[in-house]
Image: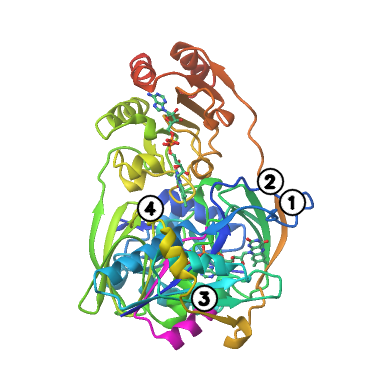
Amino acid sequence: MAVLCLAEVAGGAVALDATAKAVSASAKLGDVTLLVCGAAGDEAAKLAGVSRVLVTEDAAYAHGLAENLAALIVSLAGDYAHITAPATTTGKNVLPRVAALLDVMVLTDVTSVVDADTFQRPIYAGNAIQTVRSKDEKKVITFRTSTFEAAGQTGSAAVEATAGAGDTGLSAFVEDKVAESDRPELTSAKIVVSGGRGVGSEEDFAIIEKLADKLGAAVGASRAAVDSGFAPNDWQVGQTGKVVAPELYIACGISGAIQHLAGMKDSKVIVAINKDEEAPIFQVADFGLVADLFQAVPELTEKL
Amino acid sequence: MKVLVPVKRVIDYNVKVRVKGDGTGVDLANVKMSMNPFDEIAVEEAIRLKEAGVASEVVVVSIGEKKAVDTLRNALAMGADRGILVTEDQGVEIEPLAVAKILAKVVAEEAPELVILGKQAIDNDMNATGQMLAALLGWGQATFASEVLISEGKAVVTREVDGGLQTISVGLPAIVTTDLRLNEPRYASLPNIMKAKKKPLDEKTAADYGVDTTPRLTVVKTEEPAAREAGIKVGSVDELIAKLKEGGLV
Ligand SMILES: Cc1cc2nc3c(=O)[nH]c(=O)nc-3n(C[C@H](O)[C@H](O)[C@H](O)COP(=O)(O)OP(=O)(O)OC[C@H]3O[C@@H](n4cnc5c(N)ncnc54)[C@H](O)[C@@H]3O)c2cc1C
Ligand SMILES: Cc1cc2nc3c(=O)[nH]c(=O)nc-3n(C[C@H](O)[C@H](O)[C@H](O)COP(=O)(O)OP(=O)(O)OC[C@H]3O[C@@H](n4cnc5c(N)ncnc54)[C@H](O)[C@@H]3O)c2cc1C
C-alpha cells in the first residue's frame, strides 16, 4: 500500500536529513509519495524509496501553518494507507490535526515499525517502550528521526506539481526568529557538546561552544541552561526538547535528570564531565571524568 | 472572554517509572500523581489573563478517574474559578482522539474563546490532544507557545520550533498549547487551598456527552528500554582523549 510522507521544509528548502530519515521509515510500509510544500522537490526526488514527489509552492504553505497543511494532506489522503512525517515541530503540529480530521488516532514519535499496523513508541520520557497496534483504516504517524537511518540518494522519482487546497484563513504568519549558525544541525550532527546549569552563565557557555567548534560539533543544552538564559531554546535536548543520537555526546555540567537522558541516551558514546562523582549522568556515560568543567573543557579543546 | 483549560492527572515527574513484570504496562500503584507540568503552565497563563482583565472566567476540566478531582482542586487553588470532572469508568484510559471529542462537547456547552492545553502529557508523551481538538472544532491552533498576547479578537503567539522561534497570529476562538518557558506557575497558598474546596465543581461522565471512547489502539506490550552498559571513569583529560582516539571518535 502507498504512503504519503510530508517532507520537512525549513527556510524555503527541503531539510534533507529529517526527510530522508522519515522516508526510510516510511519505505518499510510501502511505496512513498513525498509531499513537498513551499519548496522545490528535485533534491528530495533522489531519495531511495520515493516513487513520486508532489510539489506545491503555493504561498499558503510557505511557513508551515498547520491548518493549511492539514487541509491539503486530508484532500490527498484518499489514495494512501499511511500518512507520515518526521517528528519535527512541524510534524508534531500538523499530523495530529490531520488524524482528527480523518477521525483516526495519531501515533507520534514512533521509533520502530513492526508491521503495517504495529509500531513501537517510547512513553514516560523513554522509561518504557510501548508496542501498539492500530485498528484504524488509515494510520497517521510521526517518526522519531534519531532512530532511523537516512535513505540514500540513489532514486529518481518523478516530480509533479499539485494544486493547493487554499488558505483556511485561520492563522497567519507574523515572523521567524531563526538562529543563523555555521554549526551542524543538532539532530543530525555526528558529535554534540552540551552544557548544563554547571556552566553558570551565558558568557561561560563560550567554552562549550569552543569545544564544539574544535570538533565540528553541534551545541546542546539542558533545560536548566536554557531556562537560565545561558542558551537559546532550540538547543534544548530532552523529553520536551530535541532527541539526538550522535556518535559522540559530551555532557558538561549536566546532572543527568531522566528528562535530559530521554533526549540523548541513544547516543553511541556518551562522555560526562561533572565535578560531582555521584551525578546520575555517570550511570549512562561510557567515559566519565570527575572534574571542574572550567578546567577540563578548555584543556580538552586545547589538546584535541 | 472565557478560558477553558484541560488538565490531566499524571505520574509525578520526579517518580522513576517501573514497567510491570508481565509487560502489561507501567506500575502506577502507590506512586505520587500530580498535575501534568505543562497543564500547570496552562492554568497559570489563564489566571494571568484573568488578572490582566483579558479573561472573565477560567474553567478547568479533567477527564479520567475520580481521583482527577484532586488535580482540579489544585487548579482551583491556583486561581481557576470552576471545575468540570468527566469520569470514564471503563477502566481503560481514553486516547487523545476521544479526549478531544469530549473536550469539543465541553467547548460547545461552555463557549470559551480560548482553550489552553499543555503541549504534551509527560506520561504518554503523545503531544496530540490540542491539535486534535482544534481540528474537530475547525479552529486555528498555536502550539508550543512561549508567549501569548491577546488583542482585538486575535492571539499573537510565539512558538518554540526546531529552528528557533516562530510568531503567528490566530483568530479567536483558538487553541493554544503551552511550552515550558511560557511562564512559571505559582504555588497555591494554604488559604487558597481552603477556598478552592468551596468552588463549584460539576461531575459528568463520558456517556453524558455521547462520545464513543472505544480505543483505536491496542497496547501489545510495554517493555523496559535496552539498558546502557556501565562505562568507566577516566582519571584525566589526557586519558579521555586517548579513549576517544582509540574509538576513532575524534
Ligand atoms: C515537564 C518537564 C520537562 C523537562 N524537560 C527537560 C528536557 O527536555 N531537557 C532537560 O535537559 N531537562 C528537562 N527537564 C528538567 C530536568 O528535570 C532537570 O531539571 C534538568 O535537566 C537539569 O539540568 P542540569 O543537569 O543542567 O542542571 P542540574 O541538575 O542543576 O545539574 C548541574 C550539574 O552541573 C554540575 N556542575 C556544577 N558546576 C560544575 C563545574 N564547575 N564543573 C563540572 N560540573 C559542575 C553539578 O555537579 C550538577 O551535576 C524537564 C522537567 C520537567 C518538569
Ligand atoms: C490502549 C491504550 C492503553 C493505554 N494504557 C495506558 C496506561 O496503562 N497508562 C497510562 O497512563 N496511559 C495509558 N494510555 C494512554 C492514555 O489514554 C492517555 O492519557 C491518552 O492517550 C492521552 O495522551 P497524552 O496524555 O499523551 O496526551 P497529550 O496529547 O500529550 O496531552 C496534551 C494535553 O491535552 C490535555 N489532556 C490530555 N488528556 C487529558 C485528560 N484526560 N483530561 C484533561 N486534559 C487532558 C492536557 O492539557 C495535556 O497537557 C493508554 C492508551 C491506549 C490507547
Q: Could you tell me residue B51's position as x and y percent? A: 27, 69
Amino acid carrying mark 3 in the image: Ala
- Comparing B20 with A176, the one in front is B20
Quadrant showing the N terminus of chain A = bottom right
Residue positioned 45% across, 54% down in the render:
A19
Q: Earlier in the sequence, mark 2 or mark 3?
A: 3
Q: Residues within 10 Å of mark 2 (few under 14, many from 20)?
A: some
User: Which mark is nearer the camera, 2 or 4?
Assistant: 2
Q: CA distance from mark 4 to mark 3?
A: 31 Å
Q: Which mark is residue A15?
A: 4
Q: Are discs 1 and 3 both within one chain?
A: yes
Label 1 secondary element: loop
Q: CA distance from mark 1 to mark 3?
A: 29 Å
Q: Is residue B17 left or right of residue A58?
A: right
The residue under label 2 is B224
User: Which residue is found at the position 34% from the left and 67% from the top?
Assistant: B47
**Dot 1 and dot 4 residues touching (CB under 8 Å):** no
Disc 4: host chain: A
Chain bearing mark 1: B
* Contact flag, marks 1 and 3 (Cβ < 8 Å): no
Where does the magenta region start and end?
B101-121
Residue under circle 3?
B100
